[in-house]
Image: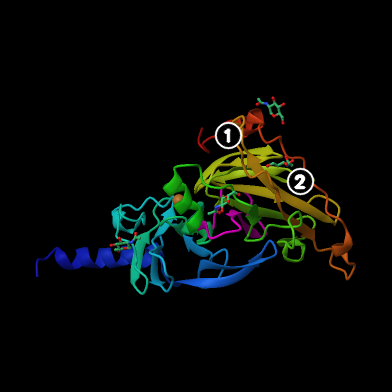
Amino acid sequence: MESWLLPFLLALSLLFRYSGAEVHYHDFVVQATPVRRLCKAHSIITVNGQFPGPTIEVKNGDTLVINVVNRARYNVTLHWHGVRQMRTAWADGPEFVTQCPIRPGGSYRYRFTIEGQEGTLWWHAHSSWLRATIYGALIIHPKDNSYPFTKPKREIPVLLGEWWDRNPINVVRQATRTGAAPNNSDAFTINGEPGDLYKCSRKHTTVIPARAGETNLFRFINAALNAELFVAIAGHKMTVVGADASYTKPFTTSVLMLGPGQTTDVLVTMDQPASRYYIAARAYASAQGVPFDNTTTTAILEYDCGSSEPVRVVQPAFPALPAYNDTRAATTFSAGIKSLQG
Ligand SMILES: *[C@@H]1O[C@H](CO)[C@@H](O)[C@H](O)[C@H]1NC(C)=O
Ligand SMILES: *[C@@H]1O[C@H](CO)[C@@H](O)[C@H](O)[C@H]1NC(C)=O
Ligand SMILES: *[C@@H]1O[C@H](CO)[C@@H](O)[C@H](O)[C@H]1NC(C)=O
Ligand SMILES: *[C@@H]1O[C@H](CO)[C@@H](O)[C@H](O)[C@H]1NC(C)=O
Ligand SMILES: [Cu+2]
């Protein structure tokens, strides 16, 4: 053996040992799953029967190994939205671009490392319109748990989705066949549920628990296919601290605007009286005369007052949302996002 080789190997092994990086293994089974939404029974395609799909949590520097088994009747691939895929381009996921689709009955193993990214990303199907129901959060914690802001008490992924009262595959197939725009969606969702303002949905509205005084990190993800969305929380200001897995210079706002695929991390302090507050989202759509889904999705932020007092009976307060075509609100928000260093 060369004399330098042993010390070299030792140094290398120490480097890996002390980097603290982990490998996370996940099994994702793509399958048909029965759900009810908007008074109707549907068979949607999910990962592991979950809608939204499983949340993946890693630390910056960790490696993910995701074994995907396709038990659905469609070809599928998964895309890790926003992951830089340094030296693993083949794991990116767009079908017929970086890989052949995983056929029904087939499987494929994605393996990649998160390098130099912290914050919120997400994953979704990248085959036809399967991403309408196949998506989930990908949360990247800092290596040593050190955020460039006060450590939040709770971290809450909030996935905004778009729902068709049909098989979304048929919606895009029809559009491709006719050349016309695809049919508008019938609802937006928060963590898979349309919320109180839609028919047959009240009972299943997403409820997000909170406790007075704590500061929580909300990780908003716009998983809608075609809609830019305004988001607001009644009675609460939001301090934006990150976007698309990069930290940003903090700024405070009462409304967010997320394009499809974008994520925004905000700190919210529970500084209001113990009660219930709507988190609401609806479209930003400024093109005149172009129809769009003008419905509003809601979840409920519910303070736990630590007693048996049923805060539940209180009608939640509703936030002010900008008009659908309020371009000024959209650009004011976007212009507020600046680099942490800047
Ligand atoms: C499904 O995937 C296979 C290969 O992975 C491909 O040959 C076939 O054309 C795909 N089918 C569709 C409908 O895209
Ligand atoms: C699209 O909308 C039209 C008009 O409401 C309807 O007739 C058609 O069946 C819809 N197509 C799909 C695939 O949902
Ligand atoms: C949404 O659009 C429909 C027509 O597509 C219209 O009848 C309805 O008033 C609109 N609702 C809102 C809240 O703008
Ligand atoms: C926004 O929509 C309203 C109607 O809802 C219309 O009166 C107004 O002219 C629109 N503004 C712009 C800038 O398109
Ligand atoms: Cu994507």
Question: Is residue 124 found inside the magenta-colored segment of the image?
Answer: no
In the image, residue 35 above or below residue 81: below
In the image, residue 103 above or below residue 319: below
State left or right for residue 275 relative to residue 12: right
Where is residue 193 drawn, in percent x and y? 66, 60
Taking the image as drawn, is residue 42 in sight?
A: yes
Where is residue 225 drawn, in percent x and y? 52, 49
**Kind of element beneath mark 1:** helix
Residue placed most toward the observer, 164 or 31: 164
State left or right for residue 241 relative to residue 38: left
| Residue 23's disc number | none
Disc 1 and disc 2: Cα gap in Å?
Answer: 19 Å
Residue at 49% of width from left, 49% of height from top?
A: 245
Quadrant field for ligand 3: top right
Residue 292 appears in which quarter of the rendering?
top right
Residue at 66% of width from left, 32% of height from top?
A: 325
Residue 25 appears in which quarter of the rendering?
bottom left
Pointer 1 local density, CA inside 10 Å: few below 14, some 14–19, many at least 20: few
Residue placed most toward the observer, 325 or 310: 325
Q: Which residue is mark 1?
A: 334
Where is residue 113 drawn, in percent x and y? 37, 59
The number of discs equals 2
> Which quadrant would the N terminus be assigned to in this image?
bottom left
| Residue interval drawn in magenta | 145-168
Pointer 2 local density, CA inside 10 Å: few below 14, some 14–19, many at least 20: some
Residue placed most toward the observer, 286 or 54: 286
Residue at 64% of width from left, 52% of height from top?
A: 186
Type of the residue with mark 2: His
Q: Which residue is mark 2?
A: 236
Type of the residue with mark 1: Ser
